[in-house]
Image: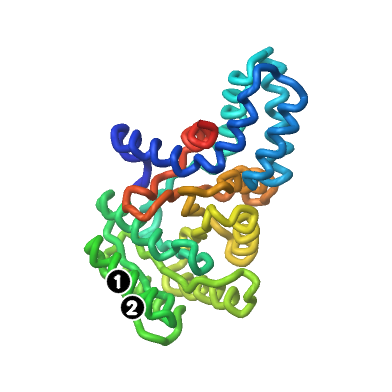
Amino acid sequence: MTVVDKPAAPSRGGWLGRLKQGLRKTGAGIAQVFTGTRIEESLYDDLESALLMADAGVAATEFLLSDLRRRVKDSKATEPAAVKALLADALTALLVPLQRPLTIGAAAPTVIMVTGVNGAGKTTSIGKLTRHLAEADCKVLLAAADTFRAAAREQLAVWAGRNQVEIVSQEGGDPAAVTFDAVTAGRARGCDVVIADTAGRLPTQTHLMEELKKIQRVIGKAQAGAPHEVLLVVDGNTGQNALAQVKAFDAALGLTGLIVTKLDGTAKGGVLAAIARWGTQRAAGPVPVYFIGIGEKMEDLQTFDAREFAQALLG
């Protein structure tokens, strides 16, 4: 069993600095609330506005404010700085259910289906995920199931070359057939992981969502119980629209995990709180955030840690 978890502490330290820098636009508005000298009702009003501006959404904002008031009362905090620390605790507690590592090895191969809208950074994220898995000594096979976009196949082939892994690709043709061939090949070659890169699409395009369902069914025919992971890559810059995508793709496919990209420079990083709050109402429980991304470099995709994120967001 392979757990794709945090890197060693020294490299994690550099990551934390980059994460804090990436979230500065989101955090600045929230941090501004705590620059006063007294705890007054206006502080909570300003914090509500700041959280909504950060795209935390109404449900998560109301929950965080209620939790924060309770924590302030229990701790008898009197300074805004102390309230800010308590907000970090409240945000961490809300986000903790999203913190779960990607685990490989319960099935051989573990089949991962990756989806998302065009421009979210899906293929790039697959390349970075492949590097994480390769570094954990996993034998990976990539399936270029975005068969109608030549650029997608070429981009995935470049990542396969960089990571020295095999790829199953086909020009044109049926995406489900390519995925079937890849899973079959992965089993025959003794691969640990097969990752299928599906075509980017909007969740409002019903015929394309049906194609995703077909790919999912065909994977199950190639290997019973697969896909074992259905991941959605979402752009953190899209705020509440990212939550709408999560809901739509989950309804169609039953998501098992998220990769949230492009958090560098976003003013909408609060959307993770919205996703976490929605997850408490979901029958199957929260959808974990396996990785978050803050840039183009290989090391800019790392495992999600609730406490790190909350502290980086609030400075």
In the figure, 309 relative to 84: above or below?
A: below
Frontmost of labels 2 and 1 is: 1
- Residue drawn at (63%, 20%), measured in percent from left and top? 80
* Front-most of residues 154 and 93: 154
Residue 1 seen from this side:
no
At x 77%, y 25%, the residue is 41
For the residue labelled by badge 2, is the local secondary structure a helix, a strand or a loop? loop
Cβ–Cβ under 8 Å for marks 2 and 1:
yes
Disc 2 and disc 1: Cα gap in Å? 8 Å
- Camera-side residue of 179 and 313: 313
User: How packed is label 1: few (under 14 Cα within 10 Å), some, or many (20 or more)?
Assistant: many
Query: Quadrant of the rendered structure where residue 88 is?
Result: top right
Looking at the image, residue 184 sits to the left or right of residue 88; the answer is: left
What colouring method underlies this structural image?
rainbow
Image spot of residue 87 (x, y percent): 61, 28
**Location of residue 129 with respect to 81 vertically, above or below:** below
Question: Which residue is labeled 1 in the image?
Answer: 157
Q: Inspect the image, locate mark 1, and give the three-letter code of the amino acid beneath it.
A: Ala
Q: Is residue 6 visible?
A: yes
Instruction: State the residue position of label 2.
Output: 169
Circle 1 — which element? helix
- The kind of residue tagged 2 is Ser
Q: Residue at x 58, y 27 (%)?
A: 89
x and y percentages locating residue 233 in the rendered image: 49, 59
